[in-house]
Image (cartoon, grey):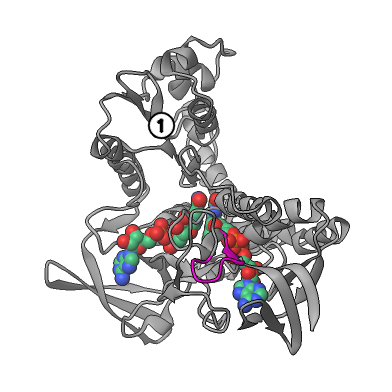
């Protein structure tokens, strides 16, 4: 049996976050990784996805060239070459991170880990004992109980396949379907999104979703809500999706059907019982310090936490807090109130804080500043196809409770709102700041 102060299961954003405080305090740390160091975000998520989004952005810009009085012919995207570019950009990431871990003094062990005791782990026949064990094993696509579900692809396949499909159906109308749907549509594929619930992109402000919905429809994406997929059948290398809306069945033929129905904590192969880690169907019961309730020497962070946002900065943040709790004792609690996030459609949907519905539900008296900014000079200058914002301000204090943007460099501007919210800068104070001009940032003063 090898002994460590800390053994981390998973070498993604969350696992890496744990190593910062624990190694700075001189604890002995082992990290077990089953695939590639870096995990989902740099290898199969954010980074490769953004390479495709950047290309789709370029197509979008070229398509609007005429508005800048530039004559161009119809752009043609070489999908196979784009996938090769994506792979080239991310190629060295695992090796670079191996270097970072070595420099930090973390022992990286490759293999699949599982519990063999409350403080013990096995990996390929090696047995490790630790004072603290951290579950940072991420998430995986939700499996769907639909006949023919085995014909579905997932986001990994989309990011790997050099062949551009002609017709694509996404099951689920969430973040992955919208982002990859926008890329596919710009590349020339016909895209359909089937969402089971009444609303698309459920966690976002409803008015922001309405904006991106019409922009998605403008580029030809077909969107169906309250659509229940009944079965997926394969014949002659084509797939047929049968779905029902209000009991009425329809079919769509496609050459790719993508599971975009959410991701669940990847913990079912860890033998949590052997670790005395209580869970309900993969939802590990944790306290406010991210510790297992049944075994407080076991921590959970990142996508493996079932009830916090599945975002890479959240995974890093939770991992960092877990590291600090191991070193300082359990005193640090996560605060998710001011975490900015974007859906990288084209244009992006950016948000921080409460939606209008949530602010009202929580009993706040609010002033809501909703702006269609398409006629504003900056939007006209850049020929934006969508430019919209909604800022939610508490009436009594002028504090910003939430900000939501579609287009208008929202994925960058949202950080100004997040900083203001974190440091108690009020809406009038943010409006009064001096901004360089002409910039999208300068419009903040007129947004509220
Ligand atoms: C297509 C896609 C696009 C995304 N885009 C964005 C984005 O733009 N912005 C954003 O903020 N977030 C994005 N996300 C979400 C983001 O990638 C995740 O929230 C983040 O990577 C989670 O980090 P993690 O460390 O918790 O898990 P992971 O990064 O998944 O790391 C977990 C690691 O654990 C390893 N592992 C699993 N089981 C074991 C085991 N038994 N033993 C040893 N190792 C094991 C895995 O191999 C993996 O490397 C995206 C996700 C996807 C799928
Ligand atoms: N830009 C980003 O930050 C980014 C990008 C990609 C992914 N992610 C993360 O990855 C996670 C997974 O993404 P996702 O898009 O798969 O999940 P999601 O939770 O965003 O959306 C899943 C959608 O599928 C629907 N759904 C579930 N079962 C269904 C069914 N049987 N039929 C039809 N619809 C069904 C849900 O109602 C929901 O709207 C997200 O939570 C997100 O945080 C983040």
Q: Is residue 408 magenta?
A: no
Residue 48: image quadrant is bottom right
- x, y percent for residue 199: 26, 53
Residue 77: image quadrant is bottom right
Q: Residue at x 39, y 32 (%)?
A: 402
Towards the viewer: 213 or 238? 213
Q: Give the answer, above or below, for where 364 lies relative to 96.
A: above
- Tell me the magenta residue range: 292-301
User: Is the residue at mark 1 in contact range of ligand 2, meaning its CB lies under 8 Å from it?
Assistant: no
Residue 259: image quadrant is bottom left
Q: Give the answer, above or below, for where 77 lies relative to 119.
A: above
Quarter of the image where the C terminus is located: top left
Quarter of the image where the N terminus is located: bottom right
To which residue does mark 1 refer?
Answer: 403
Q: Is residue 78 visible?
A: no
Q: Residue at x 73, y 87 (%)?
A: 124
Q: Residue at x 37, y 25 (%)?
A: 374
Q: Is residue 158 visible?
A: yes
Report the label total: 1
Q: Is residue 121 left or right of residue 266?
A: right
Instruction: Determine whether the residue tagged by mark 1 lies in a helix, strand or loop.
Output: strand
Q: Is residue 300 magenta?
A: yes
Towards the viewer: 417 or 133? 133
- x, y percent for residue 56: 53, 49
- x, y percent for residue 184: 47, 58
- x, y percent for residue 209: 32, 44
Q: Give the answer, above or below, for where 130 lies relative to 178.
A: below
Which SS does the magenta portion mostly show?
Answer: loop
Towards the viewer: 163 or 407? 407
Q: Give the answer, above or below, for where 52 lies relative to 390.
A: below
């Amino acid at each position: 049996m090898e002994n460590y102060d800390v053994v981390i299961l998973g070498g993604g954003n969350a696992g890496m976050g744990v190593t910062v405080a624990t190694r700075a305090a001189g604890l002995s740390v082992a990290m077990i990784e089953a695939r590639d160091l870096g995990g989902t975000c740099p290898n199969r998520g954010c980074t490769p996805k953004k390479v495709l989004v950047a290309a789709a952005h370029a197509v979008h810009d070229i398509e609007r060239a005429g508005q800048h009085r530039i004559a161009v012919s119809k752009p043609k995207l070489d999908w196979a070459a784009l996938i090769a570019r994506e792979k080239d950009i991310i190629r060295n990431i695992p090796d670079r991170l191996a270097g970072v871990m070595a420099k930090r003094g973390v022992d990286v062990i490759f293999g699949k880990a599982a519990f063999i005791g409350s403080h013990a782990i096995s990996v390929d026949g090696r047995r490790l004992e630790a004072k603290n064990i951290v579950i940072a094993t991420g998430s995986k696509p939700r499996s769907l109980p639909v006949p023919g579900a085995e014909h579905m692809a997932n986001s990994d396949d989309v990011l790997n396949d050099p062949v551009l499909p002609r017709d694509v159906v996404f099951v689920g109308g969430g973040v992955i379907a919208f982002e990859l749907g926008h890329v596919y549509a710009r590349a020339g594929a016909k895209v359909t999104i089937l969402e089971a619930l009444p609303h698309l992109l459920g966690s976002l402000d409803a008015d922001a979703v309405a904006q991106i919905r019409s922009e998605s429809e403008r580029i030809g994406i077909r969107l169906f809500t309250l659509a229940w997929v009944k079965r997926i059948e394969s014949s002659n290398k084509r797939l047929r999706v049968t779905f029902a809306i209000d009991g009425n069945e329809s079919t769509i033929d496609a050459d790719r059907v993508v599971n975009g129905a959410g991701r669940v904590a990847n913990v079912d192969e860890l033998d949590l019982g052997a670790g005395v880690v209580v869970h309900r169907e993969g939802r590990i019961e944790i306290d406010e310090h991210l510790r297992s309730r049944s075994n407080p020497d076991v921590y959970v962070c990142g996508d493996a936490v079932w009830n916090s946002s599945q975002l890479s900065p959240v995974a890093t943040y939770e991992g960092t807090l877990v590291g600090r709790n191991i070193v300082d004792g359990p005193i640090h609690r996560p605060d998710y109130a001011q975490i900015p996030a974007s859906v990288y459609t084209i244009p992006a949907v950016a948000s921080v804080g409460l939606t209008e519905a949530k602010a009202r539900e929580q009993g706040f008296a609010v002033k809501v500043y909703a702006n269609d900014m398409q006629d504003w000079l900056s939007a006209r200058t850049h020929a934006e196809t969508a430019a919209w914002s909604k800022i939610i301000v508490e009436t009594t204090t002028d504090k910003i409770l939430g900000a939501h943007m579609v287009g208008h460099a929202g994925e960058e501007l949202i950080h100004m709102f997040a900083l203001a919210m974190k440091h108690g800068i009020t809406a009038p104070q943010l409006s009064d700041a001096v901004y360089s001009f002409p910039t999208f940032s300068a419009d903040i003063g007129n947004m509220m």
